[in-house]
Image (cartoon, rainbow, N blue to C red):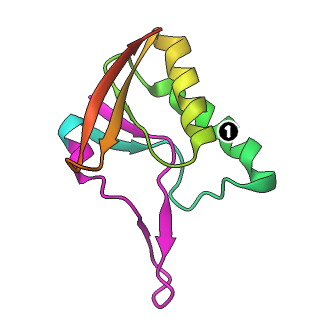
Amino acid sequence: MKVFLPHVPIRRDPISGNTAPIVNLNPALAFGELVPLLAPDRFVHGDYLQDAVDDCREAAKQIGVEDWICCLGDSVLLAVTLMTAGERNGRVKLLRWDRNKRTYNPVEIEL
């Protein structure tokens, strides 16, 4: 199984210029291999949003019925990912963050 990441929010270190996710994705590894749908430094705002949506929709076609989608990042890209996977598979499997337990809770939705 794989865990698809529609959009991973990142931050840039002002000194080194390196980027890193602003969320801990390690708990999601318990559900499978992490697969980002877009490059981590992909700009997804303003005039670039439609291109990102199109690329995300195309990349989301690889999501299978047993794969998971991690709910994080840009809400538009998450919606496109869920819509694409749902249309193809008839259901979606989500990982929803529980900030109190500091882990992901699995949620399966039949469409």
Looking at the image, which is closer to me, 35 or 81? 81
The N terminus sits in image quarter: top left
Dot 1 alpha-carbon crowd within 10 angstroms: few under 14, some 14 to 19, many 20 or more = many
Farthest residue toward the right? 47
**Along the horizontal axis of the image, is 19 left or right of 3?**
right
Label 1 SS: helix
Farthest residue toward the bottom? 15
In percent of width and height, residue 15 lies at 47, 91
Q: Which residue is drawn at 49% across and 70% down?
A: 11
Q: Is residue 80 visible?
A: yes
In percent of width and height, residue 81 lies at 54, 31
- Identify residue for label 1: 53
Q: Is residue 58 visible?
A: no
In percent of width and height, residue 27 lies at 22, 48
Q: In this view, does 45 lie above or below 76?
A: below
Q: Residue at x 43, y 25 (%)?
A: 63
Bounds of the magenta span?
A: 1-29
Q: In this view, does 13 lie above or below 103?
A: below
Name which residue type carries label 1.
Val
In percent of width and height, residue 60 lies at 52, 30
Q: Is residue 19 above or below residue 13?
A: above
Looking at the image, which is closer to me, 110 or 54? 110
